[in-house]
């Protein structure tokens, strides 16, 4: 078997919350747009990373994912996020921290999920 990409599905009560985090803050782009449909949905992408975002209140209550975005320049990412969208910085990991396992990390959170930004 040869897998080439992992594409998570993330469910939001209000997909506008996801767009603020991923499009406005992390600068993903919308590659497929069904935001005005009866069941709002879009596919976002940045640098080969892809995420499916859905508006579905029932599933949003059942699924609260957390995932990691790995970077080669965590200081650049942190500076940009902290200056443009500090409200997303997670209170438990709001600054770049060298973790016991050797990675530098800081974390983001919105109403639906947590994202750890990591550099090895």
Image (spheres, rainbow, N blue to C red):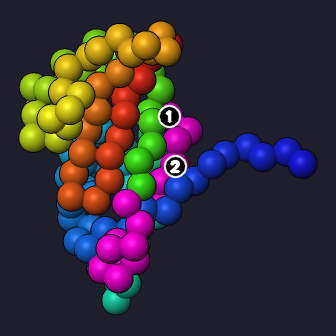
Range of magenta residues: 47-64
Residue at (37% x, 60% y) in the render: 64
Q: Where is residue 102 in the image (x, y as percent from the top left)?
A: 47, 10
Q: Where is residue 9 in the image (x, y as percent from the top left)?
A: 49, 62
Residue at (15% x, 35% y) in the render: 91
Residue at (20% x, 20% y) in the render: 95
Question: Which residue in the protein does label 2 denote?
Answer: 50
> In the rendered image of this protein, does residue 82 appear above or below residue 16?
above
> In the rendered image of this protein, does residue 84 appear above or below residue 7?
above
Q: Which of 87 and 99 is in front in this view?
A: 99
Q: Does the magenta stretch include residue 49?
A: yes
Q: Please indicate whether residue 12 sits to the left or right of residue 45 in the image.
A: left
Question: Which residue in the protein does label 1 denote?
Answer: 47
Q: Please indicate whether residue 45 sits to the left or right of residue 38 in the image.
A: right
Check contact, mark 2 vs mark 1: CB within 8 A: no
Residue at (53% x, 56% y) in the render: 8
Pointer 2: residues within 10 angstroms few (<14), some, or many (20+)? some
Label of residue 84 in the image: none
Whether residue 31 is visible here, answered yes or no, is no
- Label 2 secondary element: strand
Q: Does the magenta stretch include residue 44?
A: no
Pointer 1: residues within 10 angstroms few (<14), some, or many (20+)? few
């Amino acid at each position: 078997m040869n897998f080439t990409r992992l594409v998570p599905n993330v469910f939001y009560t209000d997909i506008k919350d996801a767009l603020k985090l991923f499009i406005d803050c992390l600068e993903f782009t919308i590659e497929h747009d069904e935001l005005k449909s009866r069941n709002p949905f879009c596919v976002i992408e940045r640098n080969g990373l892809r995420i499916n975002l859905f508006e579905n209140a029932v599933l949003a209550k059942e699924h609260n994912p957390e995932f990691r975005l790995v970077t080669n320049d965590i200081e650049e990412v942190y500076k940009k996020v902290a200056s443009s969208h500090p409200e997303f910085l997670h209170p438990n990991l709001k600054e770049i921290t060298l973790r016991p396992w050797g990675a530098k990390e800081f974390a983001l959170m919105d109403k639906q999920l947590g994202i750890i930004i990591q550099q090895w």
